[in-house]
Image (cartoon, coloured by chain):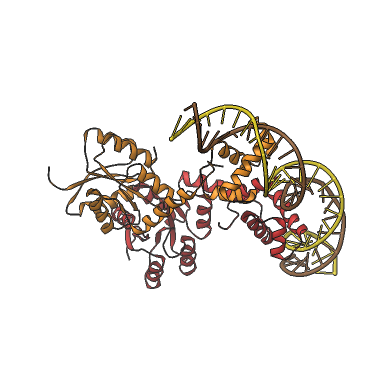
Chain colours: A orange, B red, C yellow, D brown
Amino acid sequence: MDNKISVFIVDDHPLIVEGLSNAIQNMHNITLAGYAKTAAECLQYFINHHADLILMDINLPDIKGTELCKLIKAKKPAVNIIALSNITDGNYINAIIENGASGYLLKNSDKTEIEAAINEVIKGNLYLNSEVNSIYQAAKQRQNSLPTLTKREKQILQLITTGLTNSQIAEQLFISIDTVDTHRKNLHTKLHVKNTAQLISTAIENQLISEF
Amino acid sequence: MDNKISVFIVDDHPLIVEGLSNAIQNMHNITLAGYAKTAAECLQYFINHHADLILMDINLPDIKGTELCKLIKAKKPAVNIIALSNITDGNYINAIIENGASGYLLKNSDKTEIEAAINEVIKGNLYLNSEVNSIYQAAKQRQNSLPTLTKREKQILQLITTGLTNSQIAEQLFISIDTVDTHRKNLHTKLHVKNTAQLISTAIENQLISEF
DNA sequence: CGCCTAATACCGCAAAAAGGTGAATTATAA
DNA sequence: TTATAATTCACCTTTTTGCGGTATTAGGCG
């Protein structure tokens, strides 16, 4: 075994794989271990092969990048992971790092940055470029400043969003209208809003609602 | 001039440019005219150069892909444009095609598909793969089924979302509360909703609100 | 010019939400 | 077990909506 860093690529975009592997093969202390187009192929590879680092697209066709991260880290804690994505959503960055990634690169990164990221991460450091980092920090802040809603509150918030009135919600949950009203008031207090319109818009803005 | 199709690439992702240009140079009847990382560079190029087709990322750093499309088509109507994106949002696909693109490729396309797209578009056909096409059709359908809100209605909808009450809106717009109420009723009728909660959630869902 | 649409305004009644206060009953975690 | 948090219910007042109408005015268009 030589002292080159071996890198494995996971990405379902053939163009990116081509660009990445080309770029990596031109770096003097880095070598390409292989690549996979799906999470399944990647896991398969790591059963009886090894690599020092994974460059991983977090939007894979089969399972979520966060999941793959967790799986890899559980089986091979020594493998470093750099997430590769276009997504500049703070919650996403947050999630992937909490699942074991040591770096997050935007897909518009160039060779220099990729090389820098690989070298940093292999040293055990966390690599985020300034843009990603500021988004990440902002998201953590926001997450902390967001109040935690109780199970019941979320449930009622969801039903309000659907357009149900307090009495309809009460009927559906087999509770009193007054109870629904109380939860609603608490939602207002917690989210610092004063009417339904604000409630819905801030709820959606902060993704407190599962889907619609 | 030989009979090869000359292709110009516009993308701010170095990896994609590398992958694409590699792929294109391996195609027998296609040649690479050049590439640009920004819309400005692309426009600059076309002042005194030419290409048969542009492969264009529609998420450029300087101006929107839709805009670049329009600009190019205005100056060089003969140039065919294939949009390249990850975005599977129907409205986006719709917009870009209405602005003059003849094809829409997802970034996870492989060489075969890119080659097929180029050859179809050069013949004057519209190229959308089945996935993109179904999204596109669905969006067109949805767009037609969406009612058109008047200027005033949009404005009031926006203010409602902020959390203002009818009287506050009336005050701000120097109109009667009753007028605001009428607009609100019309919004309910047009969007088939029966209360504020539904109004806000469907408005956001259908992106009838500028931003928040 | 008429026709249509958007925007304006008003009335009345019923329903729902908002705001305040207090309190009992479960869970659940320390 | 004992705090603490979550969930539940009640009652009261005021404000805001929701829903049914009707009607006038200004501007764009063929």
State whether residue B105 appears in this view: no
Q: Is residue B40 above or below residue A144?
A: below
Residue at x 71% of width, y 53% of height: B184
Residue at x 74% of width, y 64% of height: B175
Residue at x 41% of width, y 59% of height: B56
Residue B92 located left or right of residue A135: right
Callout count: 0
Q: Is residue A164 above or below residue B173?
A: above
Residue at x 16% of width, y 48% of height: A4
The picture places residue A66, in percent across and down from the top left corner, at 37, 41
Determine the residue located farthest toward the bottom in the rendered image: B48
Q: Give the quarter of the image for residue B2.
A: bottom left
The picture places residue A207, in percent across and down from the top left corner, at 51, 46
Residue B164 located left or right of residue A53: right
Determine the residue located farthest toward the left in the rendered image: A2
* Image quadrant occupied by the N terminus of chain B: bottom left
State whether residue A133 appears in this view: yes
* Image quadrant occupied by the C terminus of chain B: bottom right
Question: Depth check: B180 or A212 in front?
Answer: B180
The picture places residue A20, in percent across and down from the top left corner, at 28, 51
Question: Depth check: B208 or B66 in front?
Answer: B208
The picture places residue B54, in percent across and down from the top left corner, at 40, 60
